[in-house]
């Protein structure tokens, strides 16, 4: 499907793709005066919303790199400058055991969640990032973590790649014991969600675990406006159950375990791949 979309892109008239990129550049590179956590682009103001056209893969990739390349500081937009307290709590509570596991974290951004898995005993934790600048930022962050006292023993690294196309060079498809999805599923265009679920099914091994921290849960928001696109536990079930995932845990995240701007809008779900 992606290949087909790439071919379609290649046959577009150049002025259409150029104008898409230019309009995205204009939208995304407009300086912001305030820090806006959780937002990638501003929702349109007023008027009835129209479902956006799906981005072509190249434009979509450029878009993330444009944001990172423009200089995304720690604590800006979706970057919370820290790991999710909810995943820290889930691992500490022993509700899932990642000792000795290989863990995949796609769309890891600066990689704040990677050390959480490594310090809970994971053997290998890999962050996968599409945007080259994000890869550099995440590697720099992991260097800081590794240089600090009490650095986790597990191997942590960041790979550059597209979740939809990438295959684990070490173990191949279906070799990950654990996957963690946070602010990644909601970054997908709604029409890419089935593909998103399909590729989770491809990456996680049979008997493995997928942890989805579902955000932003907001039934009143326009489902076509994002990212982050509003999501729900029901939507995740609809997408993941056909990919052989069965739900083993579902709990709304208590307010004190969310980054403050996300409180009340997160649900932790854990899945086991049959
Ligand atoms: C909303 S950000 C969240 C980053 C991180 N999870 C966090 O909470 O800070 C989504 C990230 O996914 C990356 N991304 C988007 N599409 C991707 C893809 N197909 N494969 C890998 N990474 C992707 C983007 O570059 C971006 O850094």
Image (cartoon, helix red, strand yellow):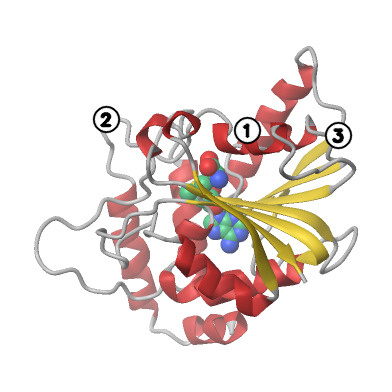
Q: Which residue is mark 1?
A: 89
Horizontally, residue 21 falls left or right of residue 106, namely left
Q: Which label number is shown at residue 34?
A: 2
| Residue 25 in the image: above or below residue 109 | below
Out of 11 and 146, give the one closest to the viewer.
146
Out of 55 and 25, give the one closest to the viewer.
55
User: Secondary structure under badge 1?
Assistant: helix
Callout 1: CB less than 8 Å from ligand 1: no
Q: Which residue is mark 3?
A: 154
Farthest residue in the left direction?
47
Q: What residue is drawn where x is 85% and y is 47%?
A: 101
Q: Nearer the viewer, mark 1 or mark 3?
A: 1
Q: Is residue 84 visible?
A: no
| Residue 210 in the image: above or below residue 5 | above
Picture quadrant of residue 70? top left
Instruction: Tell me how far mark 2 sits from mark 1, CA to CA.
Output: 30 Å
Callout 3: CB less than 8 Å from ligand 1: no
Q: Quadrant of the N terminus?
A: bottom right
User: Secondary structure under badge 2?
Assistant: loop
Label 2 Cα crowd, 10 Å radius (few <14 / some 14-19 / many 20+) = few
Tell me which numbered mark, 1 or 3, is placed earlier along the sequence: 1
């Amino acid at each position: 499907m992606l290949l087909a979309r790439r071919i379609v892109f290649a046959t577009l008239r150049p002025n259409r793709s150029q104008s898409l990129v230019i309009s995205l550049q204009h939208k995304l590179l407009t300086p912001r005066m305030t820090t806006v956590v959780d937002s990638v682009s501003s929702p349109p103001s007023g008027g009835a919303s129209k479902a956006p056209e799906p981005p072509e893969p190249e434009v979509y990739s450029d878009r993330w790199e444009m944001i990172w390349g423009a200089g995304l500081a720690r604590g800006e937009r979706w970057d919370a400058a820290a790991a999710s307290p909810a995943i820290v709590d889930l691992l500490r509570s022993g509700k899932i055991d990642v000792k000795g596991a290989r863990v995949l974290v796609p769309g890891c951004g600066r990689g704040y969640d990677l050390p959480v898995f490594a310090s809970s005993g994971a053997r290998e934790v890999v962050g996968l990032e599409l945007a080259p600048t994000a890869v550099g930022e995440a590697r720099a962050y992991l260097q800081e973590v590794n240089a600090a006292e009490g650095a986790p023993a597990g191997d942590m690294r960041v790979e550059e790649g597209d979740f939809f196309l990438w295959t684990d060079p070490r173990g191949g498809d279906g070799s990950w014991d654990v996957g963690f999805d946070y602010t990644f599923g909601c970054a997908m265009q709604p029409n890419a969600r089935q593909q998103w679920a399909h590729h989770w099914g491809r990456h996680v091994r049979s008997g493995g675990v997928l942890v989805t921290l579902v955000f932003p849960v907001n039934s009143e928001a326009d489902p076509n406006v994002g990212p982050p696109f509003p999501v729900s536990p029901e939507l995740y079930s609809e997408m993941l159950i056909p990919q052989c995932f069965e739900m083993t845990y579902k709990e709304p995240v208590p307010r004190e375990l969310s980054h403050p701007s996300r409180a009340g809008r997160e649900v932790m779900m854990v899945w086991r791949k049959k």
